[in-house]
Image (cartoon, rainbow, N blue to C red):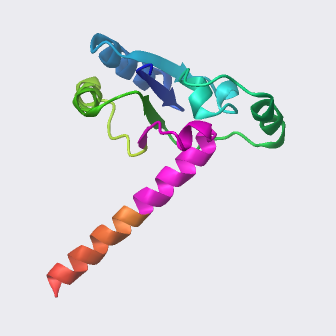
Amino acid sequence: MKESILLFNFEQQKARKLAAQLMMAKFKVKVVKEEEWKYPIGCLCGWKDLTEEDEQDTLKEEFSLDTSMLVMAGVDGNRLNQVLTAIKKAAVGKIPYKAIVTETNQNWLPKTLLEELKQEHEQMQSENSDKTMLHEK
C-alpha cells in the first residue's frame, strides 16, 4: 500500500509549508487541485484506478469543499505521529479535519469524506460539552 498525504483546499502558502515538512519526513505529498475533487479518495492516493462508474458519478456531483482537509493513505501508528509532528513544525495552525484512508472511504468523494469528518467532529464537541456540564454539577 502506497504511503501518501493528500492536502485539500489549503491556502497556497500553508500547503507549501506543510508539504515541505511532510516531505522532509519522507512522505509523498499531493496537493489536490480543485478540478480533482470530483474523484474518489482511493483514486487520488493511487490505491485504485478510476472506473467507468466513477467517471459517471463525476458528471452528477457538485465538488466544493468549504475548509481544509488532510487525508493520509497507508500511514500506520508510528508514521501517524510523524505526520502530526510535521504539522506542528509547519506552524500552519490547527487542521481539524484529518482522516486515514480505509477500505470504505477510499470509494468516497472528498466532499463526502469531509461531511463525515464534520459530523464526527460535531459529535465529539457535543460529547465533550456534555461531560463538562456533568463535571460542573
Q: Is residue 105 magenta?
A: yes
Q: Main secondary structure of the magenta part?
A: helix
Residue nearest the viewer, comparing 57 with 135:
57
**Residue 35, x across and y down, in percent:** 70, 26
* Magenta residues, start to end: 98-122
Q: Which quarter of the figure is the N terminus placed in?
A: top left
**Residue 72, x across and y down, in percent:** 42, 31
Residue nearest the viewer, comparing 46 with 127:
46
- Above or below residue 122? Residue 85 is above
Residue at the image point whose x is 35% and y is 64% from the top: 125
Say left or right for 33 vs 89. Answer: right
Quadrant housing residue 41: top right
Residue at the image point whose x is 62% and y is 38% from the top: 107
**Residue 97, x across and y down, in percent:** 43, 44
Q: Residue furthest bottom?
A: 137
Residue at the image point whose x is 54% and y is 46% from the top: 114
**Residue 26, x across and y down, in percent:** 31, 12
Residue at the image point whose x is 41% and y is 65% from the top: 123
- Above or below residue 25? Residue 115 is below
Quadrant housing residue 86: top left
Quadrant housing residue 124: bottom left
